[in-house]
């Protein structure tokens, strides 16, 4: 089960996701990027069914871009979250998407924000959120150590604590994680936490 | 004897099982007797499961310095019955792209052929070849639109385009993964072990072919649903080329030749003194 978690800091938001692509007992890939950049100031981390995850997040990404083309201004994070939830809700009773989403964004007027959207289309604006088996460890870690107005360094320390906890306590722990951050400057990849490098195993 | 229970459908019917002598069978809930089998519904499920394609195969592909190496076995099985030892599991989409087959044979063959048609149409419409990423995305989107309807496809699209060698894994759940090493099918865990430990990016074509062949052989040795002939293809800058097709039984004796066993005790005639 894929782990995705995120938190809001002083003037930024962070989303962390594991990066293994798994099929029953096989790990096909250990560097799969599950956090999609929706636009310059929004990131969306998703976990769930492989096909649904990639297809649904791309669908949201293209619609966000379309809105900007049509209207000349980008969507706010709240509007994007509500749009995403609406799409999940409409499909729910017909052809449900099995994806859990953590959406983070930075708006000039309202600052950073984080939205928790689960696969049955419930939507919550939160300061910290987590999905997957990793959530059992990440949520309590975040509850214990999180403070409003954390700096980037403090937040990354907390994220690393959560990753270490997941790695040591979860029986089928994902080896690698990707961390993305969104702030005034925009959305970007912050770091990878890798304990297995994909590619040639026996490197000279 | 088991009777099928319809009492839930008729609220005014007497409580399940109760038939007094007075009313007899008139007020009893209408029902009929089921056959006296151990598991009445299980038979149907078991029959479907046996025939259902369970991706009984071993296919693998990897990118290296000289391009992409693609290999597969050639066994088709239906439950415990080997229906064929000579199935072509590497499908030639066009002269510079290959697809591998795992899952339903008909599904893979049809959709790969369909993909080949769409790639050719793309070439004619855009006056340039389609990229491996584009072809795999087309296939992935088609399979995604059929998700939940029972298609069983686990394929790798390997090719050489303007960006160099490309390899994508695409399956019928709608997943699409870009990577450098993949193996698909029931024998894939066995193949992964051999492939991962022997892989280097700077293998030569012969070394890479031998690695691919060896990985398929080891998977066929351990997995009952894989066997037949290990085919190895190479995709280079000028397109694909079939390198070898060896029977895995023969490969076994090539890798592990029969050694004359030392006879410990030999019975000899005792010469009568």
Image: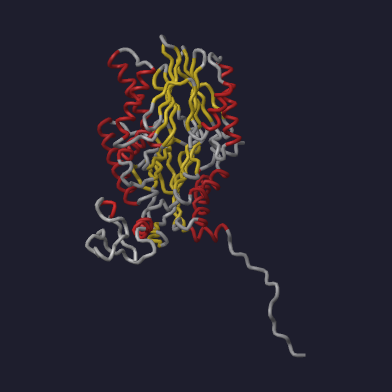
Q: Quadrant of residue A166?
A: top right
* Residue A93 pos. (x, y %): 30, 35
Identify the residue at the far bottom of this view: B273
* Residue A177 pos. (x, y %): 53, 30
Front-lying residue, A123 or B93? A123
Residue A192 falls left or right of residue B74: right
Residue B220 falls left or right of residue B98: right
* Residue A145 pos. (x, y %): 58, 21
* Residue A204 pos. (x, y %): 62, 36
Residue drawn at point x = 57 percent, y = 26 percent: A141
> What sort of colour scheme is used for the picture?
secondary structure
Residue drawn at point x = 41 percent, y = 42 percent: B156
Residue A122 falls left or right of residue A137: left
Where is A129 relative to B200, above or below? Answer: above
Front-lying residue, A98 or B147? A98
Q: Quadrant of residue A102?
A: top left
Identify the residue at the far right of this view: B273
Residue drawn at point x = 35 percent, y = 46 percent: B92
Identify the residue at the far front of this view: B22
Where is B150 relative to B15, above or below? Answer: above
Where is A54 relative to B1, above or below? Answer: above
Identify the residue at the far top of this view: A109
Q: How many marks?
A: 0
Q: Quadrant of residue B27?
A: bottom left
């Amino acid at each position: 089960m894929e782990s995705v978690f995120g938190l809001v800091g002083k003037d930024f938001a962070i989303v962390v996701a594991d990066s293994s692509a798994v099929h029953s007992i096989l790990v096909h890939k250990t560097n799969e990027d599950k956090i999609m950049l929706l636009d310059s100031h929004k990131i969306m981390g998703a976990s769930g069914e492989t096909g649904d995850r990639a297809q649904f997040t791309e669908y949201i990404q293209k619609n966000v871009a379309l809105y900007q083309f049509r209207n000349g201004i980008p969507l706010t994070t709240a509007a994007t979250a509500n749009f995403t939830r609406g799409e999940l809700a409409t499909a729910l009773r017909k052809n449900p998407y099995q994806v859990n989403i953590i959406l983070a964004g930075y708006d000039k007027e309202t600052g950073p924000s984080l939205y928790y959207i689960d696969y049955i289309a419930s939507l919550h604006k939160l300061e910290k959120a987590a999905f997957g088996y990793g959530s059992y460890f990440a949520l309590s870690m975040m509850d214990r150590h999180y403070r409003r107005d954390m700096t980037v360094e403090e937040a990354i320390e907390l994220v690393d604590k959560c990753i270490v906890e997941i790695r040591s306590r979860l029986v089928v722990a994902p080896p690698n994680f990707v961390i993305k951050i969104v702030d005034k400057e925009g959305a970007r990849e912050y770091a990878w936490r890798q304990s297995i490098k994909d590619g040639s195993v026996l490197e000279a | 004897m088991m009777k099928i229970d319809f009492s839930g459908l008729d609220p005014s019917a007497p409580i399940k099982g109760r038939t007094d002598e007075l009313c007899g069978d008139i007020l009893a809930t209408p029902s009929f007797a089921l056959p006296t089998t151990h598991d009445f519904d299980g038979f149907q499920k078991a029959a479907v499961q046996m025939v259902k394609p369970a991706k009984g195969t071993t296919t693998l592909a990897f990118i290296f310095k000289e391009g992409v190496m693609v290999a597969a076995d050639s066994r088709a099985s239906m439950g415990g019955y080997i229906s064929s030892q000579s199935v072509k599991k590497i499908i030639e989409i066009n002269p510079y792209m290959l697809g591998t087959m795992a899952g339903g044979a008909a599904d893979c063959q049809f959709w790969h052929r369909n993909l080949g048609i769409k790639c050719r149409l793309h070439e004619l419409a855009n006056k340039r070849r389609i990229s491996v990423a584009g072809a795999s995305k087309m296939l992935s989107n088609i399979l995604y639109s059929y998700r939940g309807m029972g298609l069983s496809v686990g394929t790798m699209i390997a090719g050489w385009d303007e960006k160099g060698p490309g390899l994508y894994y695409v399956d019928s759940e709608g997943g699409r993964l870009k990577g450098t090493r993949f193996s698909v099918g029931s024998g894939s865990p066995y193949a992964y072990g051999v492939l991962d430990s022997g892989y280097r990016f700077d293998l030569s074509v012969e070394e890479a072919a031998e690695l691919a062949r060896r990985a398929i052989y080891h998977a066929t040795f351990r997995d009952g649903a894989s066997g037949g002939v290990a085919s190895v293809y190479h995709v280079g800058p000028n397109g694909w080329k079939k390198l070898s097709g060896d029977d895995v039984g023969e490969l076994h004796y090539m890798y592990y030749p029969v050694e004359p066993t030392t006879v410990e005790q030999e019975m000899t005639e005792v010469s009568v003194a």
